[in-house]
Image (tube, rainbow, N blue to C red):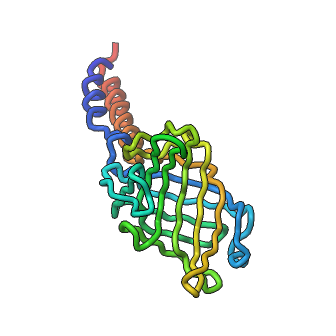
């Protein structure tokens, strides 16, 4: 067994780490608790939301726009994609930017996944509902204590935020009126890289096989 230790150390040294990845995959889920009447033919209270998104830890900060103070930063990246299903069959997908609100005092901290095309490289693909076109999608995580963020780009940690919401907005044909469907985010978690687990299992299999062959080659007493 001692002879296998160096091989095990060598194998583990080549095993990738989830924390070192630049683009981190996440899953999320939620439940609808608000539907504008104009959208009631497509959505209902209690409808589930499920989906995935990719967070780019190397996003570069830019301004949130003229309506925001200096404590708001946006992090666009073409690598930040999302997809999801609302209800039984309403599919949406696109690209997003991360928006961080970290006021020095007063309002709480907020981490947002925001897709409101054409702003900041974001895009949104989803069906229209009764002639109303999808305009934006966002997941908002709020920390009333104001301690979750420190003006630095970080991946979301679900338990750090007491308020967790999602919202899908639609624009009416008149180009002015808007309608919303929204609800509570019930789970949001990082997904371990499958390659890490696969390599570990494969490596252990090789080591166990080598040990078995070593036993078979021992001369009988």
List x then y, in percent, for residue 164: 60, 50
Q: Camera-side residue: 23 or 73?
A: 73
List x then y, in percent, for residue 203: 34, 37
Q: Camera-side residue: 155 or 38?
A: 38
Q: Is the N terminus in the top left, top right, bottom left or bottom right quadrant?
A: top left
Residue 2 to residue 149: above or below: above
Residue 82 to residue 2: above or below: below
Q: Which residue is drawn at the image coordinates 60% and 76% (left, top)?
A: 178
Residue 64 to residue 161: above or below: below
Q: Is the C terminus in the top left, top right, bottom left or bottom right quadrant?
A: top left
Q: Which residue is drawn at the image coordinates 42% and 48% (left, top)?
A: 194
Q: Camera-side residue: 103 or 3?
A: 103
Residue 74 to residue 144: above or below: below
List x then y, in percent, for residue 145: 56, 37
**Is residue 196 shown left or right of residue 33?**
left
Any part of residue 192 in sight: yes
Q: Which residue is drawn at the image coordinates 36% and 56% (left, top)?
A: 75
List x then y, in percent, for residue 105: 49, 40
Please tell me how many numbered marks the rendered image carries.
Answer: 0
Q: Which residue is drawn at the image coordinates 63% and 70% (left, top)?
A: 180
**Is residue 25 shown left or right of residue 164?**
left
Image quarter for residue 179? bottom right
**Is residue 168 shown left or right of residue 151?**
right
Any part of residue 127 in sight: no
């Amino acid at each position: 067994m001692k002879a296998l230790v160096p091989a095990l150390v060598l194998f583990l040294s080549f095993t990738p780490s989830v924390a070192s990845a630049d683009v981190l995959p996440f899953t999320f889920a939620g439940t609808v608790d608000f539907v504008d009447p104009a959208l009631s033919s497509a959505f209902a209270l209690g409808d589930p939301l499920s989906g995935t998104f990719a967070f780019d830890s190397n996003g570069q900060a830019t301004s949130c726009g003229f309506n925001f103070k200096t404590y708001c930063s946006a992090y666009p990246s073409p690598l930040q994609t999302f997809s999801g299903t609302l209800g039984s069959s309403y599919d949406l997908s696109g690209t997003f930017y991360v928006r961080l609100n970290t006021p020095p005092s007063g309002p709480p901290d907020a981490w947002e996944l925001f897709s409101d095309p054409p702003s900041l490289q974001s895009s949104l693909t989803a069906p229209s509902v009764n002639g109303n076109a999808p305009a934006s999608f966002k997941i908002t995580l709020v920390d009333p204590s104001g301690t979750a963020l420190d003006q630095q780009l970080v991946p979301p940690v679900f338990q750090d935020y007491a308020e967790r919401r999602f919202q899908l907005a639609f624009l009416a044909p008149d180009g002015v009126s808007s309608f919303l469907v929204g609800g509570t985010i019930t789970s949001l978690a990082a997904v371990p890289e499958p390659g890490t687990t696969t390599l570990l299992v494969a490596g252990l299999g090789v080591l166990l096989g080598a040990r078995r062959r070593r036993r078979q080659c021992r001369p009988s007493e």
